[in-house]
Amino acid sequence: MIKDFAKHLFPRAVLQRDLTFSYTFCLGGLAFTCFLLLLASGGLLLFYYQPTPAAAFPSILLLESSVWGGAYLRSLHRLSSHFFLVLIMAHTLRVVLTGAYQRPRELNWVTGCALMMLAVFEGYTGYLLPMDQLALWATQTGMELVSIMPLGERLRAVLVPDGVGEPMSLLRFYVLHILIVPGAILLLSSLHFYRIRKNKGVLPYL
Amino acid sequence: MADTHQSRRNFIGTLISLAAGGWLLGKFLTPKVRRKKTLLTVAKSELPLEGALVYREARVALLRQGEDVYALNLVCTHLGCTVNVTATGLVCPCHGSRFDRHGNVLEGPADRPLERYEVEAGGEGYRVLV
């Protein structure tokens, strides 16, 4: 079944010219690969992380000091999150420069923008989880920025019902980071890929 | 159902990668939780109220001030000589560092306080844990 699915990801016939690497630089695919890496490494990190203010930082120290491959997995997760964002930005730039946002691909442009924002939000929620000084103050800054937006106070009250880095807000950031936002990214990127196939893949854009 | 035919080479390859993956995962999921070892056990009655017991071999001193019982590692934080416990404080014979009874530095060249060991009071005695 997996093989059949993979077979149908691509049309039966493509022009060789359209598969030229410099056409797309595979940026979207690389970003998705990063996402898969993030899912795998994050899934393993779940076995050790404890989402309470008192235990979060010690749990990371334990992971780094006495778990085989723990430090490696954590830096893999962090590094691929950086690459994820960079690749998405580069992909956006490529789409703008090749004019791929035009008819008939408007829907994919919109879902792509939504995916980009979700990716940034995913990174932001993940930033608080280690509960070190950097995490705390970066999140504090973000929340101050949110509260000057229109309706920002409402949003802030939902994201951070108590102070930044207190039990309830840490738990909310955790749930957003491991469940809600990745789920949304997965759903939206499925739609994104479906539309690529529907719009005849990487055929000439203009 | 899809074609179930599978070459022997594929099957063995899958088997090996599954076993290797499982082994790595098992290694990741069993953290080395270090159990604290008991360095020495001292009967409660042996430790005077405002006194200290010095174990030069183990390089540890058990000190007591009223209810507060704590253990100091006697390895000097400067270059690792064994410090002497005197009535007023702790003095390093090698380079003259001086520490107070809590292990804080009074005089250099040492720049960090003496390391403390955890002391567990249980039943009959005190146990110094490393």
Image (cartoon, coloured by chain):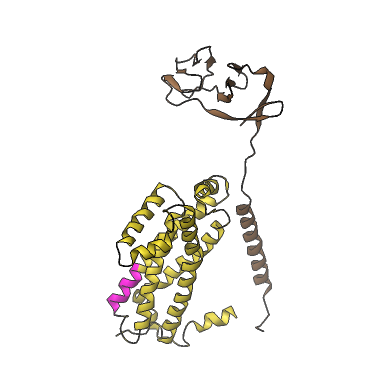
Chain colours: A yellow, B brown
In the displayed structure, would residue B85 be above or below residue A62?
Answer: above
Give the residue displayed 38% in from the left and 75% down from the top.
Answer: A112
Give the residue displayed 46% in from the left and 72% down from the top.
Answer: A184
x, y (%) of residue B15? Answer: 67, 66
Classify residue A119 as left or right of residue A9.
left
Residue A26 appears anywhere in the view: no
- Which part of the image, by quadrant, shows the C terminus of chain A? bottom left
Q: So how many labels did they put on this image?
A: 0
The single residue placed furthest to the right in the displayed view is: B124
In the displayed structure, would residue A5 be above or below residue A42?
Answer: below
x, y (%) of residue A190? Answer: 47, 77
The single residue placed furthest to the top in the displayed view is: B87
Nearest the viewer among A205 and A187 is A187
Nearest the viewer among B53 and B121 is B121
x, y (%) of residue B82? Answer: 54, 18
Q: Quadrant of residue B49?
A: top right
Q: Quadrant of residue A157?
A: bottom left
Q: Which residues are magenta?
A: A89-99
x, y (%) of residue A17? Answer: 37, 82
Nearest the viewer among B75 and A164 is A164
Nearest the viewer among A104 and A59 is A59
Classify residue A57 as left or right of residue B64.
left
Residue A92 included in the magenta stretch of the image: yes
Residue B54 included in the magenta stretch of the image: no
Give the residue displayed 64% in from the left and 67% down from the top.
Answer: B13
- Majority secondary structure of the magenta segment? helix
- Which part of the image, by quadrant, shows the N terminus of chain A? bottom right
Residue B15 appears anywhere in the view: yes
